[in-house]
Amino acid sequence: QLQASGGGLVQAGGSLRLSCAASGRTFRGYDLGWFRQAPGKEREFVAAISWSGGSTYYAVSVKGRFTISRDNAKNTVDLQMNSLKPEDTAVYYCAAPRYNQYYSGDYYKSAKYDDWGQGTQVTVSS
């Protein structure tokens, strides 16, 4: 089970830090991702981090503003969001695969991920 937290209401230009904790499974050895879904839109890729932590990947729309990180000891993955824009408003989901441990790839595809957090709302006001 994945539990996401840290969402909220923030003004444009502000920052939020999302955190996702796992229970009943390990994050160690798996790529981890964050996705988001805005009202009336499909879920989209935001960021991912490789199982080793050595590589990170970002959607073009958030690159340079968001930073994904992981802590295998704590079994968590975080998303630091800076310079937030109204278009970042969405429900944010953390995700982790259950299979293909120590495999890195297809990080932007939602089909890669089997376990999803419940989502945390991020609202950015203009």
Image (cartoon, grey):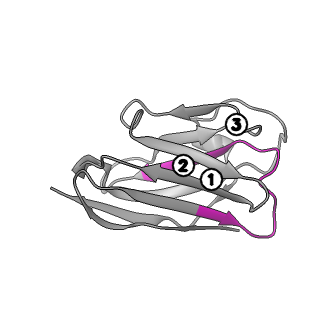
Other residues around mark 2 within 10 Å, as few (<14) / some (14–19) / many (≥20): many
Asked whether, in this view, residue 108 is left or right of residue 84, the answer is right
Other residues around mark 1 within 10 Å, as few (<14) / some (14–19) / many (≥20): many
Find the magenta span and give its range.
Answer: 20-36
- Above or below, 67 against 86 in this view is above
Is 22 a magenta residue?
yes
Name the residue at 31% across, 57% down. Answer: 39
Q: What residue is disc 1 on?
A: 95
How far is the residue under mark 1 from the one under mark 3?
12 Å
Name the residue at 40% across, 47% down. Answer: 42
* Labels 2, 3: front one: 3
Is 30 a magenta residue?
yes
Q: Are marks 1 and 3 in contact (CB under 8 Å)?
A: no
Label at residue 50: 3
Q: What residue is disc 2 on?
A: 34
Task: Give amino acid for label 2.
Answer: Trp
Q: Are marks 2 and 3 in contact (CB under 8 Å)?
A: no
Label at residue 73: none
Name the residue at 40% across, 33% down. Answer: 64
